[in-house]
Image (cartoon, grey):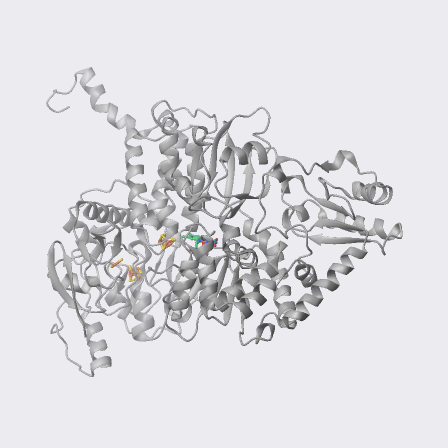
Amino acid sequence: MKRSDLQAMARRELDRQQATRCRLLCCASTPCLSSGAATVQQALEQAVTDNKLDAEVVVVSTGCMGPCSRGPMVTVQLAGQEDTYYENVTPESARQIVAEHVMANQPVADKIMPSDLPFFAKQHKIVLANSGVIDPERLEDYVARDGYAALAHALREMTPEEVCAEISKSGLRGRGGAGYPTGLKWDLVRKAPGEKKYVIANGDEGDPGAYMDRTLMESDPHRLLEGMAIAGYAVGAEQGFLYVRGEYPIAAKRLEKAIRTAERRGLLGSRVLESSFSFRIDIRIGAGAFVCGEETALMASIMGRRGQPTPRPPYPAQSGLWECPTLINNVETFGNIVPIIAHGADWFASVGTAKSKGSKIFALAGKVNTTGLIEVPMGITLREVIDDIGGGVADGFSFKAAQTGGPSGGCIPAEHLDTPMDYESLRALGAIMGSGGLIVMDNASCMPDVAKFFMEFCTDESCGKCVPCRVGTVQMHRILERITNGSAAPADLQILQDLCTMVQETSLCGLGQSAPNPVLSTLRFYREEYEAHIQRHECPAGVCKMTEAPTLELVEALPRRIRELGTIPMSLA
Amino acid sequence: MAVITMTINDELVSGVEGQSLLSLIREQGIELPTLCHLEGLEARGGCRLCLVEMQSTQRLLPACTTTAQEGMSIQTHSERLVRYRRMILELLFAERNHVCAVCVMNGRCELQDEAAKIGMDHVRYDYLVPELPMDATHDKFAIDHNRCILCTRCVSVCDSVEGAHTWDVMGRGVNSRVITDLNQPWGSSRSCTSCGKCVQVCPTGALANKGSTVAEMVKRHDFLQWILDGREKKQWVMHNGGSEGRR
Ligand SMILES: Cc1cc2nc3c(=O)[nH]c(=O)nc-3n(C[C@H](O)[C@H](O)[C@H](O)COP(=O)(O)O)c2cc1C
Ligand code: SF4
Ligand code: SF4
Ligand code: FES
């Protein structure tokens, strides 16, 4: 396939789409599928056939539309009208939509999710632009929306150096958590000496509750492949690996299919778009270890070894897979490449703040009215996200904390709700941008209990290689266990704090280094809750059972009791 | 080989390019505890006892896996480092059942030595008292998981020096355990050559010759250098006259 063939394919598909009067988009991402989207789609298709509408109406299964808690979601695209979003669609309402909206132009009012809701209006879709709009399993759908045009442009009109420079200029930073400048990383790999180089997309996504990367892989797989291919061209790699979390079978299946389609059409494989550049992508499936998201452990896993981190330096850019220079980026990071090359670095850099450019996808969860997957401009305040996009804290509850960054992050209290969401501001609060988990908690949450939850996660997920993380997390968890069951002694708090700093500073990899963050951040903003548990044996939120007694306190009280009783000489007591 | 100069504890020292920080530090006669690393095996960076402080960034890096670089400036025994080393040792003692009084290595154990040197007189953490088995199915050796610190020296020496790869690690976190073959009894292992290298490099009483009783077990590390010299330099000379091989 040449560039002109690509353009012809896009034209054909656009003509085809314009020839249909109505497109019924039905979300086929994991959240909607689990609330029954498959039967909704069947009902839509059946209704279309039953009403003999096959010639003018198509039913398309798409990726995620965002408001996952209101799924199954269906979008009606009628020629000459604005899109209509339907929420909580059932097979019955699906038939109703076809009969009333499609056939009689009478929208089904009680199922409509108004498109002027702040949920949609405050979002800024760069990475998810195609998500919920195209059929992820059809290459033509992607190509019709300028798919692979950025790759064709880069191959023909840009040198690898220029591609790296463009990415640098855009200000894009890694979306996998640490926020390392992407262009700088690409340039390091490009300049690293070595015949063979590799590109890896990190789709391990281990944070509990996060599903940004899954959505992107499920909803727009070709965008990811195109981004990786551009990266391969920029750094001089001919082989890419896509590391997909084992729990994401739908994502893996769609990616596999997308790779095969792209290879068949000459968009991947040898001589991409009839240029001299070749690029293959292979999928590797993880086996459910959080630590395998860490880059050195991930590479060990790809090479068939035990998924355990190794000390850096050497960094992957110097010595990665099979000791070759390796570029590793998060899946969402790769999702930003195509728009940057297509619309230019300046366009991208116009969104966001001085140091954090572009958008960020968050999995908004917890006690807000609308949860789901959102893409917002960097620098938006937490308040806007919670009150506007999330529709506010659920009725009858009051806001207590927003947790970002999962087990590596922290909790942000109400007084900091106006903090702009960018890498630096969040870090200054002891939370992190992380990969995009965002959990809103209300007064029914107990902060030491939240800290305990994340510590337990780290205890389970520690690989066991280094002592501070392997044993330190268990000891920290034990103390949190004591605090939340009522048996902690005052001295425990200091021991906990000392362990936190030690584990942070001495652990081998990011898992251990960041495991204390949830404790430290809750200690910083909600210290009185810890003290209430320890000193007054009460849980202010009423979550902890506090069934145990503090044993150490008895021991400490003994000498005093003896002195009071006066039965032992004072010199001994 | 290019020469580099750097600063260790405010003293200017010189070494060769590519040398590990650990070897350069030890060349100065400075003692640095290493429980996972052993000269002759691949550095691992797991125990975190050899951490040193970079003066420029205040970051802590393991000396065993870090290469000495021109202009570096480090501290090896700052107050913070000593405090952390002691905490790490306490964590190790709390992790499994290290009852020194009834150990074959009592008096010669590296873990015990390091704890004594740093002045560790008590453990401030909960003893986790896991229930762990012993495996005494092998004719000549036995493993007591209660005393294992997961340094993986046994795994490393068996793989890279003996070439048998009998040992590996199973599980993760505190539930990790060293295993023989695919978690089969050591005695039934078909890959084990009964060479005993793992026993000799094990820092604690976890691996021992069968039949040794309390404080009887002596371990030799000198064989490792002997084999490596023989392999690389074709010299077969025993440096230590066969005495106890530890530094
Ligand atoms: C314990 C741990 C888990 C991680 N999990 C992920 C993950 O699931 N996905 C990811 O992209 N990065 C993860 N990372 C970060 C990666 O190590 C790496 O920094 C990232 O993939 C680099 O890509 P970026 O520069 O595009 O962010 C993890 C790091 C640590 C320490
Ligand atoms: S910090 Fe934890 S996960 Fe990372 S190497 Fe150490 S034990 Fe393994
Ligand atoms: S058995 Fe000995 S050498 Fe092997 S990991 Fe345990 S302590 Fe280390
Ligand atoms: S000897 Fe360096 S970390 Fe164990």
Q: Residue at x 51, y 40 (%)?
A: A438
Q: Locate residue A516, reporting x and y percent.
A: 36, 42
The quadrant of the picture showing ligand 1 is: bottom left
Q: Nearer the viewer, residue B170 or A121?
A: A121
Question: Taking B238 as reference, is A136 above or below it?
Answer: above
Q: Locate residue A81, reporting x and y percent.
A: 77, 44
Q: Residue at x 20, y 83 (%)?
A: B234
Question: Taking A474 as reference, is A489 above or below it?
Answer: above
Question: In which quarter of the view is residue A558 placed?
Answer: top left
Residue at the bottom extreme, as displayed: B234
Residue at the top extreme, as displayed: A565
Q: Locate residue A238, reporting x and y percent.
A: 50, 72
| Quarter containing the C terminus of chain A | top left
| Quarter containing the N terminus of chain A | bottom right
Residue B217 showing in the rendered view: no
Q: Locate residue A153, reporting x and y percent.
A: 57, 66
Q: Residue at x 84, y 54 (%)?
A: A56
